[in-house]
Image (cartoon, rainbow, N blue to C red):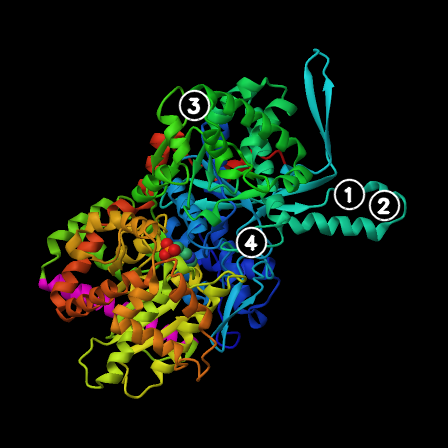
Amino acid sequence: MVENTQSNLAVTVTGVEDDRTGLSIPTLRRALADNLFYLQGKFPRIATPNDYYMALAYTVRDRLLQRWLSTIRTYLEQNVKVVSYLSAEFLLGPHLENNLINLGIYEQVQQAVTESGLDLPTLLAQEEEPGLGNGGLGRLAACYLESLATLEIPAVGYGLRYEFGIFDQEIQEGWQVEITDKWLQYGNPWEIARPEAAQMVKFGGHTEVYTDNQGAMRVNWIPGQEVKGIPYDTPILGYRVNTANTLRLWKAEAPESFDFEAFNLGDYYGSVDAKIVSENITKVLYPNDEPLQGKQLRLQQQYFFVSCALQDMIRIHLRRGNPIETFHEKFAVQLNDTHPSIGVAELMRLLVDEHGMGWERAWEITQQTFGYTNHTLLPEALEKWPLDLFRRLLPRHLEIIYEINRRFLDQVRIQYPDDHEKLAQLSLIDESGERYVRMAHLATVGSHTINGVAELHTQLLQAEVLQPFAELFAVGNWRQTFTNVTNGVTPRRWVALSNPRLTRLITSKIGDRWLTHLDDLRQLETFADDPAFQQEWRQVKQAVKEDLANRIYKQQGIAINPSSLFDIQVKRIHEYKRQHLNVLHIITLYDRLKQNPNLDLVPRTFIFGGKAAPGYVMAKLMIKLINSVAETVNNDPTVRDRVKVVFIPDYNVTNSQPVYPAADLSEQISTAGKEASGTGNMKFSLNGALTIGTLDGANVEIREEVGAENFFRFGLSADEVAQLKAGGYTPQYYYQSNVLLKSAIDLIDSGLFSGGDRELFRPLINSLMNEDPYLLFVDYPDYIECQSQVSRAYRDSEHWTRMSILNVARMGKFSSDRSIREYSDRIWHTPPVKVELEAYAQTKAGLSV
Ligand SMILES: *Cc1c(COP(=O)(O)O)cnc(C)c1O
């Protein structure tokens, strides 16, 4: 790049356009050159591709700032109600291309870049995505921020500015290897630090009761440690609107006066140690799917960002001239899972201890402020913190939680007199063994609305994990209600950006309103049987598959056949998601080919991608199994490319964007009742893949929308899973009674995929044979049968194309715009607010120079 980018950046501007906001090609070129020189400090000759990327990023940021500052000013002046989305994770993906699309300046910038002798895709590829999330939950938060801005709803996202995000994944000899994610090492052009808005956060120490000068009993928390939170703001721009909301992420620093005593005593190095300890709080993102036992730092992270956020909101609220009593009228705070649920106790502390409010009034405000989104039914994923850890770190919050619990259980007793079992079930404290604080219970009791993320999940939530609460709230005078808001994804990133070919084809037929009114896709139904349109549809899919094939060849050296059926499963690696069921199908196909080398199979390319939590032994072994099967199958001459297996390393937003559009078949095969919603399922279907899936999470609703005849459903329902488990399940019986299944397992056991090593995959086989907690063996026969239906359907290309078109046409419901409208109308009550741009020229005129 350094060689072939002898760019010609110097341009003379003759017009009057502002250098930092103008959109003409010469102005953009001039800005690029200026930024390279003045911000990167480089001549073109020695600039790296990253320097050019940075210069371009700043060029685009300048054009964003006007919208962002005007948005902030509008919210302040109009004193509007703001959504505050609290999330420990935001999996944003790269900003640059999304901002080009949402600003509507893609073509101009592309031309300016080209005329400067540079290549836009090369520059876009330089961006290190902020991997500040694990998977679905963090990505949902990112889609929601984008939709909030697009719908012009005032909002701020609060979270943690992890120095190291989710690890980068390398595959070495088939095994996952974790590499530190140094996303900040070359600087982040999208954030602006706001040290003037820093907040102090206390930890540890003890509490003291005192009497204030009105004679009221008050509590004072004397901390053992204080940490400073510095906010870093990133603008989140809506699609073709002036609204640019703020994502405010907090970085932990030691306060200036850190450990003053040690310093005065001359223990300089001791005081520096204290500084390091403070800064550890925002060092690294925790991977999920690992036990949190003893992860004190994780609780510190949660409290740290939630306390910063709530203090920040109160500061803004008071600065706008509002009384503290109207806090809930100006902020709707959403808890993205239980990770920020300590906020319930923290808001109580701030109102009661810091702002002198009475308990009852403070509790009303708190309950009217929070909404809680539950994301999981897996018992091991429900957060609970050991009581003594809690007391050590947050002594005042433990007292507050006890008081919330005491008052809550008093209410419960009225409804269920003398029912100790009920009380124990509902209590915020788990006293069944070692004592814990139950974070889901705190969130539930402290919120006005509790929601699940798909219809089935919301039902199960009320029937299982939060059943006692659902039963309790159904009678009596409770504020809380349960409701469902099915997840969605933003069509801007997941279609316009990821699949420009499909975007052009759709727009050529129905115009471009569908990008903000996804239901418009229905108009495509008219063309589902139109041979000319079908032809174009197939050409787009084919071209997108070739793009992915080229990318895989470039990055991994594996040649895949773009005419084969692309059968894709990309998501976190987890036993409940059953990547190993997919592998059993591959082994069965391989087995059949070995038995009958001339078998007439529809050629398939199986593509996998996903990270396993570093401590999740079984998931890491599943990755090894996929790669080992790939190795064997891909190199066996009898297969003759009829089956190919690829594991794409380092699955993240950047690497996922070319994958979803290229799928013919989307694998959504979780054990029914385990996947809360899924959003990958939506991205695939919206890009014309057909789904093979169980009746789990949002699959149920996708199937309802696209029609059962356009969806490959298999496997037990959630009810059947529960029944089977209740009746006692013996996997060996299923192994013995299905020859194909027995043969597939025996092939793994024989060491065929592990160079004769019969021990390597033993833990996986043992788990399946002895427990099979996710019921692979039960669903296997139906899955295999369903997969042969898929192959038969794929041979009828007209029919397949029709199904693909109908899938896209009927996916309107799954826009995150629809989800956000539901939250806003039913939970937050936050109407849109139009932002008027204040011209930068005006701002300048206002400066008293
Ligand atoms: C959408 C997405 C997910 C969620 O996928 P599921 O299939 O719903 O689990 C995870 N990771 C990334 C990078 C995504 O883009």
Amino acid bearing label 4? Tyr
Q: Camera-side residue: 731 or 443?
A: 731
Q: Which residue is mark 2?
A: 263
- Is residue 448 shown left or right of residue 699? right
Amino acid bearing label 1? Phe
Task: Report, in whole angstroms, how far the alpha carbon at label 3 lies from the one at label 1.
Answer: 51 Å
Q: Residue 699, how many percent across, how many down? A: 28, 51
Q: Which residue is mark 4?
A: 286
The span picked out in magenta is: 531-555
Tell me: residue 432, above or below residue 266.
Answer: above
Label disc, if present, on residue 416 of the rendered structure: 3
Residue 702 visible in the picture: yes
User: Between tags 2 and 3, which lies in front?
Assistant: 3
Q: Residue 574, how many percent across, how many down? A: 42, 60
Task: Report, in whole angstroms, how far the alpha carbon at label 2 lies from the one at label 1.
Answer: 8 Å
Task: Report, in whole angstroms, how far the alpha carbon at label 2 lies from the one at label 3.
Answer: 57 Å
Magenta stretch holds residue 726: no
User: Between tags 3 and 1, which lies in front?
Assistant: 3
Amino acid bearing label 3? Tyr
Q: Which badge, 4 or 3, is on the more N-terminal residue?
A: 4
Dominant secondary structure of the magenta stretch?
A: helix
Amino acid bearing label 2? Phe
Label disc, if present, on residue 258 of the rendered structure: 1
Residue 607, picture quadrant: bottom left
User: Tag 3: Cα neighbours inside 10 Å, few (<14), some, or many (≥20)?
Assistant: some
